[in-house]
Image: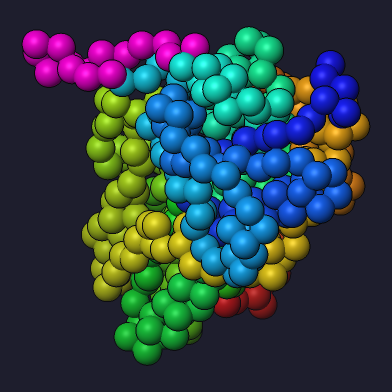
Amino acid sequence: MTPAKDIHRIGILTGGGDCPGLNAVIRAVAKTAMRQYGIECVGVEDGFYGLIHNQTRPLSFKDVSGILTRGGTILGSHNKANPARFCVGNDENGEPIFRDVTDRCIATCKQNHLDALIVIGGDGTMACAAPLVRAGINVIGVPKTIDNDLVGTEITFGFLTAVATATDALDRLHSTADSHHRVMVCEVMGRNAGWIALHSGIASGSDVILIPEIPFEPDVVCDYIAARMRSGPNFAIVVVAEGAMPRGGKQVVARLDPTSPDPIRLGGIGHVVAKMVEARTGAETRTTVLGHTQRGGTPIAADRILGTHFGYVAIETLMKGGVGRMVVRENNQFKDVDLLHSAGKQRLVPTDHSLIVAARAIGTSFGDYADRTAPVAKSAVIV
């Protein structure tokens, strides 16, 4: 374990996809390190790509001032640079060639005299950092992802802004659906986890919420919507996570990127659901895919606060002698866990989650047979 007194210079890296609140974390990490402990800070540009290619720059107070409200990351990011499996070119058949270039990352840390590395990212980023931890580099992780699917923490920064963005879009779809008596299907991000769909669906009062953890029955979805269209509202809102799938079916893959550590790019389930609903119910149906709008823009206040707190705790964890740790929030308390425990794992929505139970109680459909077994008063109508 590296004694705190030996920490003089640290690197800061933002890996994976961009996310609202990244700059809030960078700001908190750098300012706490410089102000409280006199530590020099070095920014690693474009995630692990910059660590592989030794693309770094010193960070001053001026560099990290005035960035709290900015979306994205001032350091840049990269979601295709896994040091353990880095694409170095193509063979004669055009197939990607992969190499383990972890040694280059270690060399960059040594050349820049980094005593520790603050890595900000999700499960993929923590998985990329794992070989560095095993090689003796002191890495402190900060949990970032709009998907909220990182094992070990009850929340990741960026998630709440993504939910706010999705909720705003669903609110807008509500009024146009009502005006035209249509079914509006909105596809949101989340990969294999349904956290964004669940939270934004409940916040917006969506009628149907389809998440990967609960494979849906097409008949249940369509019967529910048909009943709602007959009952009086004459419109419906469906929010569907990009990883959702029918029971016995498969996720819809938009494309494959063989050069990426995670080659599968999900997308298109919204159009599939909309086509299914229109064909089976006769209701005019439209699809909206929010895509990367959920990643961009100014972080909401909650994510600025969360990012600031995470950044501060990351430095405090390091200076208390933490090695290979990831800062987390559990039961609304900030602590740290073994980074290797979280690397490469996904935190999914439990099918008995209290929010699902609450949503079912007010009549929200998750497209499964549980909808048909729920008791409904004879005088009740679908609203």
Identify whether 212 is placed above or below 228.
above
Q: Residue at x 52, y 43 (%)?
A: 57
Is the C terminus in the top left, top right, bottom left or bottom right quadrant?
bottom right
Task: Please give left or right for residue 32 compared with residue 97 in the image.
Answer: right
Pick whichever, 64 or 128, lies toward us: 64
Identify whether 133 is placed above or below 245.
above
Q: Residue at x 59, y 19 (%)?
A: 110
Q: Residue at x 57, y 44 (%)?
A: 58
- Would you say residue 377 is visible in this rendering? yes
Quadrant assignment, res 186: bottom left
**Span colored in magenta:** 88-103
Q: Position of residue 7 (x, y in %)?
A: 79, 30
Is the N terminus in the top left, top right, bottom left or bottom right quadrant?
top right
Q: Residue at x 55, y 66 (%)?
A: 70
Q: Position of residue 297 (x, y in %)?
A: 49, 67
Task: Please give left or right for residue 316 compared with residue 104 in the image.
Answer: right
